Image (cartoon, rainbow, N blue to C red):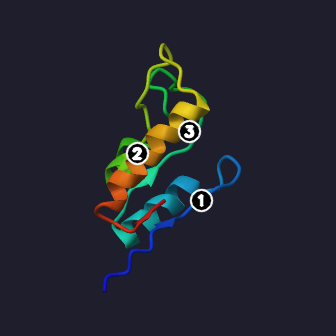
Amino acid sequence: MLDQTTYVIAIVGPTAVGKTRAAIDVAQKLNTAIISADSRQCYREMNIGVARPSPEELEAAPHHFIASHSIHQPLTAAAFELEALAKAAEIFKQKNTWC
């Protein structure tokens, strides 16, 4: 019987402590994806002060919700929850873990 357990690894902390690098390392080791929960990194037009992952970091592991929305169509916490749960369900169809 296959193990149907799924895992979410939350990497949290203050700005500039290495969360992105840690998330990429974990995602690479577990061959999974990253769902960003940053309240500003999801907006395409916000390029200053958001510490968005570099192009090299974005290529190192699949990322979701990075520059994925426009500030002209604000993303509420409720809408983010629905989108993130849908993305998690999609990832869980292929993997049992995401971070």
Q: Within 10 Å of the Cα at label 2, are there few (<14), some (14-19), or many (20+) other Cα atoms? A: few
Structural distance between the alpha carbons of marks 1 and 2? 20 Å
Tag 1's secondary structure? loop
Residue that label 1 marks: 11
Q: Within 10 Å of the Cα at label 3, are there few (<14), some (14-19), or many (20+) other Cα atoms? A: some
Q: Earlier in the sequence, mark 1 or mark 2?
A: 1
Structural distance between the alpha carbons of marks 3 and 1? 15 Å
| Residue at left offset 39%, top offset 74% | 4
Tag 3's secondary structure? loop
Q: Earlier in the sequence, mark 3 or mark 2?
A: 3
Residue 68 is left or right of residue 93, and the answer is: right
Residue that label 2 marks: 86
Residue that label 3 marks: 51
Q: Is residue 84 visible?
A: yes
> Residue 86: horizontal and vertical position, in percent?
40, 45
| Extreme-front residue of the structure | 1
Q: Amino acid at mark 3?
A: Ala
Q: Are marks 1 and 2 in contact (CB under 8 Å)?
A: no
> Residue 54: horizontal and vertical position, in percent?
42, 43
Q: Amino acid at mark 2?
A: Ala
Q: Are marks 3 and 2 in contact (CB under 8 Å)?
A: no
Q: Compared to 70, does 21 lie above or below? A: below
> Residue 75: horizontal and vertical position, in percent?
53, 26
